[in-house]
Image (cartoon, grey):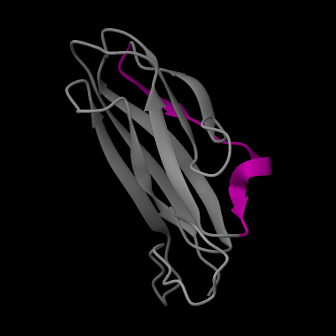
Amino acid sequence: MATNDPHQPKRGRQLDLQVSHILRKRVSFDDLSLEGEVGVLPDRAVILNARVYVVTPFSAGTMEVGDENGAPDAFGAAIALGTVAITGFGSAAEAYRPIETVVTFTRSEEATAGEAIIVIEYAVDN
């Protein structure tokens, strides 16, 4: 859980190099839950690119990508999963994250087939 307590250890990965960082999460139809955590963006991260790669079409449903402390669809709403595709998501309004942010996903319904990969590229403040 993200917190404003300065004594709480941070969970977001941040290298001391001038490189892009990546959050990557594989989502499959047979996962135990319809929702989960993609990863943690550190303080003052800027999202450079965000995509869902549908590798195997899902038999049903859509996906939302959001923020644990905000809207479940803050980054992407009703992302189609029914065909092999690369779908960009996100907006300029959501690109800057002033505090550590837990990125989550939620699928809308059970499926009998499907696999997707969520990839978020971000830059850190160093």
Residue 105 is a magenta residue: no
75 up-or-down from 112: above or below: below
Q: Quadrant of residue 11?
A: bottom left
Quadrant assignment, res 32: top left
Where is 67 relative to 42, above or below?
A: above
Residue 20, image x and y in percent?
A: 50, 70
Rendered view: 93 above or below 6? above
Report how many numbered discs are placed on residues in the image.
0
Q: Position of residue 121 (x, y in %)?
A: 51, 58
- Look at the image and say whether residue 89 sits in the magenta stretch: yes
Q: Residue at x 57, y 67 (%)?
A: 2
Residue 68: x %, y % from top left: 57, 50
Furthest residue toward right: 93
Apparent side of residue 57 relative to residue 94 in the rendered image (left or right): left
Q: Residue at x 63, y 88 (%)?
A: 6
Q: Farthest residue in the top direction?
A: 59
- The span picked out in magenta is 83-98
43 vs 50, nearest the viewer? 43
The residue positioned 39% from the left and 34% from the top of the image is: 53
Image location (x, y in percent) of residue 87: 51, 30
Q: Is residue 96 shown left or right of residue 119?
A: right
- Image quarter of the C terminus: bottom right
